[in-house]
Amino acid sequence: MKIILLGSPGVGKGTYASFIKEKYKIPHISTGDLFREAMKNETELGKKAKEYYDAGKLVPDDLTIQILGERIKRPDCEKGFMLDGFPRTIAQAEALEKMLGNMEISGMPKTDKFSSIAKIDVAINFYASDKVIMQRLGGRRICKNCGSIFHLVNRIPKKPGICDECGGELYQRADEVPEIIKKRLNTYHEQTKPLEDYYKNKGILKEIRAETDMNAPTFKEDILDKIDEALDQFK
Ligand code: AMP
């Protein structure tokens, strides 16, 4: 099963991805995570990506396509994968089709190709208003030590600035301060939204409204059950 998760920054794709990974047993590939890892390890690519990343801008397509290409060639992707945060431009979507067309997947010989987009089963578009996104992202705090996520409104740490799980220090991601979130949302509307039509025209787009917070009692029926409905036929 090959899935693309679409939706603005902060719409909750990471949370939905954990659910899908657990239930459908496919790797979760987030280009944001790949960049964070590359920056942490100070690789050449990480160094080049950093200035764009810190400014809340899209990293140029060539670097992004390279980092994603290296990841989906790994053996765990043979039976399928879920892309989170990629593609974010039409050029990236086209590059993905090319990559898949050139890869041997699930033992299918390279010559036996059908329309390469047929290899992506579904693109799920999660949507929420910019107001909801600003509140969600602006309040997020992450543990430097164990990565647990807290929120100043929805999951308040018992001691301000300290992780409930391990006592580590909480921090705010550089790209989650309000000014940068606004920039990221603008970038999303300008460059990434056209992908909705792109996949709609291919007949593989599913839409899910994602304004319910993950701690709300209706989270499962509002979002997780809808994801199941969208994916069940591809199991
Ligand atoms: P995310 O964690 O998906 O919100 O991504 C964080 C940052 O990584 C973005 O603001 C971009 O700077 C960069 N990034 C992640 N995925 C992409 C992509 N597909 N194209 C360009 N830049 C990306």
Image (cartoon, rainbow, N blue to C red):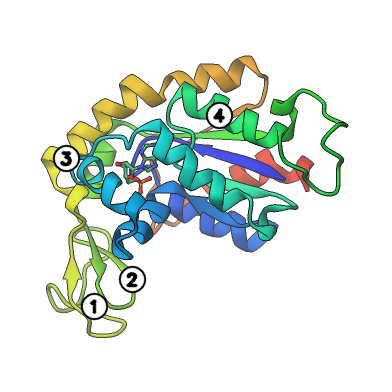
Cα gap from disc 4 to disc 1, whole angstroms: 40 Å
> What residue sits right under mark 1 in the picture?
163
Cα gap from disc 3 to disc 2, whole angstroms: 22 Å
> What residue sits right under mark 4 in the picture?
95
The residue positioned 40% from the left and 55% from the top of the image is: 33
Q: Where 169 sits versus 124, above or below?
A: below
Residue 153 lies, in percent from the top left, at: 21, 58
- In the image: residue 129, left or right of residue 212: left
Element type at marker 2?
Answer: loop
Instruction: Assess whether mark 1 and mark 4 are in contact (beta carbons under 8 angstroms).
Output: no
Q: Earlier in the sequence, mark 4 or mark 1?
A: 4
Q: Nearer the viewer, mark 4 or mark 3?
A: 4
Q: Nearer the viewer, mark 3 or mark 2?
A: 3
> What residue sits right under mark 3 in the picture?
180
Which amino acid does the dot numbered 4 rest on?
Ala
Q: Nearer the viewer, mark 4 or mark 1?
A: 4
The residue positioned 31% from the left and 35% from the top of the image is: 58
Q: Earlier in the sequence, mark 2 or mark 4?
A: 4
The residue positioned 63% from the left and 57% from the top of the image is: 74
Q: Quadrant of residue 187?
A: top left
Cα gap from disc 3 to disc 1, whole angstroms: 24 Å
**Closer to us: 103 or 154:** 103
Q: Where 205 sits versus 43, above or below?
A: above
Residue 161 lies, in percent from the top left, at: 13, 73
Few, some or many residues within 10 Å of mark 1 (<14, 14–19, 20+): many
Quarter of the render that holds ligand 1:
top left
The residue positioned 11% from the left and 38% from the top of the image is: 179
- Whether residue 225 is visible to the viewer of this picture, yes or no, is no
